[in-house]
C-alpha cells in the first residue's frame, strides 16, 4: 500500500476514534493491541514460509503459488483485513 494511502487511512481512524477515546474499554484495547502485534509476527513468518515454499514452483509459477498460499493462511488474511477501511464512515 502506498505511503500516502496509509497516512490517509491513519487520519481516518484517528478522526473516528478521537471522540470515542473517553468511552473505550482500556483493557480490551490493550489486549487487542497485543493480539495485533502477535498476528503481525505470525503473518510475517507465514509470508516467509510461502515465499520459501513457492520459490521454485515450476508447476504453477512462484507468483500464483505465493498468492494461493496467502489465501490459505488465516493469519495473513486476518492481518490483510486490517487494511480494509470500508467499515469506517467517510
Image (cartoon, rainbow, N blue to C red):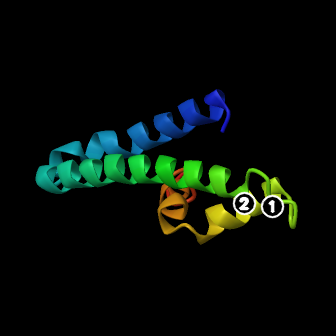
Viewer-closest of 4 and 71: 71
Element marked by disc 2? helix
Residue 60 picture location, percent across and down? 86, 65
Q: Which residue is mark 1?
A: 64
Q: Which residue is mark 2?
A: 67
Asked if residue 84 shows in the view, the reply is: no
> Residue, x 18% and y 57% (percent of image)?
28
Residue 39 picture location, percent across and down? 39, 54
Up-down relation of residue 72 to residue 42 (above or below) = below
Label 1–label 2 contact, CB within 8 A: yes
Residue 86 picture location, percent across and down? 57, 58
Viewer-closest of 44 and 55: 55
> Residue, x 42% and y 48% (percent of image)?
40
* Quadrant into which the N terminus falls: top right
> Residue, x 25% and y 49% (percent of image)?
34
Q: Is residue 82 left or right of residue 58?
A: left
Q: Is residue 29 left or right of residue 57?
A: left
Viewer-closest of 71 and 50: 50
Asked if residue 76 shows in the view, the reply is: yes
Viewer-closest of 52 and 44: 52
Up-down relation of residue 49 to residue 60 (above or below) = above
> Residue, x 67% and y 33% (percent of image)?
2
Location of residue 80 by image quarter:
bottom right
Location of residue 17 by image quarter:
top left
Give the mark count.
2
Which residue lies most toward the left here?
27
Element marked by disc 1? helix
Amino acid at each position: 500500500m502506498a505511503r500516502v494511502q496509509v497516512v490517509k487511512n491513519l487520519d481516518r481512524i484517528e478522526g473516528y476514534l478521537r471522540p470515542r477515546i473517553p468511552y473505550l474499554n482500556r483493557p480490551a484495547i490493550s489486549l487487542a493491541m497485543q493480539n495485533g502485534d502477535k498476528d503481525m509476527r505470525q503473518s510475517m513468518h507465514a509470508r516467509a514460509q510461502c515465499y520459501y515454499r513457492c520459490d521454485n514452483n515450476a508447476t504453477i509459477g512462484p507468483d500464483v503459488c505465493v498468492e494461493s498460499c496467502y489465501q490459505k493462511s488465516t493469519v495473513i488474511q486476518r492481518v490483510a483485513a486490517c487494511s480494509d477501511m470500508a467499515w469506517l464512515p467517510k
